[in-house]
Every structure is written in C-alpha cells, then in structure tokens.
Amino acid sequence: MTTARATRLTRNDWLMAGREALATTGPAALRAEALARQIGTTKGSFYWHFRDLPQFQQALIAGWEEAALQALLEAETRATPAAALLHLAQGINAGRLMEGAMRAWALSYPPAAEATGRVDAARLGRITAHLHAIGVTNPDMAHVLRAAMQGLAALDTPERADSAISSLVDLILALR
C-alpha cells in the first residue's frame, strides 16, 4: 500500500492500513503520520475519517472483534459439531497475524484486552457447546481446545496448525 493514491481514501482504506501495520509492525505503528506515509497521503485524510487516534484504534478493535464473532456464526453452519470445531480453528488460523497482533496489543491496551476477552468468552462458549453435542462434558476440554487453536495459530505454519487441530479433534472424538 505504499503507492500514491489518485482517488479519495475511505475510512475502510485507513482501517485496512491499520490492520496491516498492527499485524506486521505492532501497535506503535498505529499513528496517523506513519499510516499516511504507508499509504501515500497526508495525515489530514486520516483526520477527515477519524476524530482522533483513540477513535481509529477503537474502530480497528471493533472490526477485529466483529470478524472474530462472525467466524463463530459461520462455524455454526457446519453439518456436525466436529466440523464446526475444525472450521472455528481454521478461522483462527487464517487470521493468525491479526490474532497475534491483537493479543500482543491487549497486554498493554485495555480496550484491546476487553475485546479479546469478549472474543475468548464467545469462542469458549461455542467450543463448550460443540463438545457437549458430541458427548464431551469435561469443561477443561473446551479450555484445552481453545488454547490449542490459538496457540497453534501463533506457533506453527497454517498447514501444520490445521493438521494438528484436526488430529486433536479426532482424538477427542475417539476418547469420548
């Protein structure tokens, strides 16, 4: 996104630049001037769309939270609870860079921590429900599976993480 822009930037253009900067550089890159340089414009364009940096940051967090919660809804459309669990894990894995960036930001920025907490609670609730549907009622299993989903997305390649989660879900199904 470093090329000069011939058209007027939208609010979404700024949010896309913010997601890219957060995922690749971290929260220190979320400054109007730095983002403007990144997308080849002036910071005046930033302030046309956002009152201030906190409003931009809140919009960025809200967008991530909305996408994460939407992924939970998409998982609900799967034919079986096991398929829903796999779909949920694949969604976390697909958004691995932003997921990791949000979690790192949450360590030092309370609004990001609140959003990750809400997403974690929603994920845990859905994982628990899917596990109950397949006969696994130990609440610790939901915590283990959520931690595995998030941890593998952060630590492994996308393909390896998907394979490992699939193996873990298969193991849970075999042990029930």
Image (tube, grey):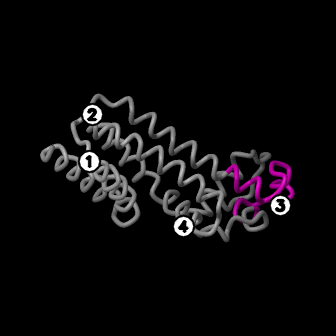
128 vs 55, nearest the viewer: 128
- Please name the amino acid that badge 1 sits on: Asn
x and y, in percent, of residue 176 in the image = 15, 43
First along the sequence among labels 1 and 3 = 3
Q: Residue furthest left?
A: 174
Q: Give the overall secondary structure of the magenta segment.
A: helix
Around disc 1, counting alpha carbons within 10 Å, would you say few (fewer than 14), some (14 to 19), or many (20 or more)?
Answer: few
| Mark 1–mark 3 distance (CA, rounded to whole Å) | 54 Å
Q: Is residue 23 left or right of residue 149?
A: right
| Mark 3–mark 4 distance (CA, rounded to whole Å) | 28 Å
Q: Mark 4 points at which residue?
A: 104
Q: Name the residue under label 3.
A: 42
Around disc 4, counting alpha carbons within 10 Å, would you say few (fewer than 14), some (14 to 19), or many (20 or more)?
Answer: some
First along the sequence among labels 3 and 4 = 3
Of the two numbered discs 1 and 3 in the rendering, the one whose residue sits closer to the viewer: 1
| Mark 2–mark 1 distance (CA, rounded to whole Å) | 12 Å
First along the sequence among labels 1 and 4 = 4
Helix, strand or loop for disc 1:
loop
Of the two numbered discs 1 and 4 in the rendering, the one whose residue sits closer to the viewer: 1
| Mark 1–mark 4 distance (CA, rounded to whole Å) | 29 Å
Residue 52 belongs to magenta span: yes
Q: Mark 2 points at which residue?
A: 133
Residue 89, placed above or below residue 41:
above
Q: In this view, does 169 lie to the left or right of 125?
A: left
- Please name the amino acid that badge 4 sits on: Ala
x and y, in percent, of residue 33 in the image = 79, 66
Q: What stretch is highlighted in magenta?
A: 36-59
Q: Mark 1 points at which residue?
A: 138
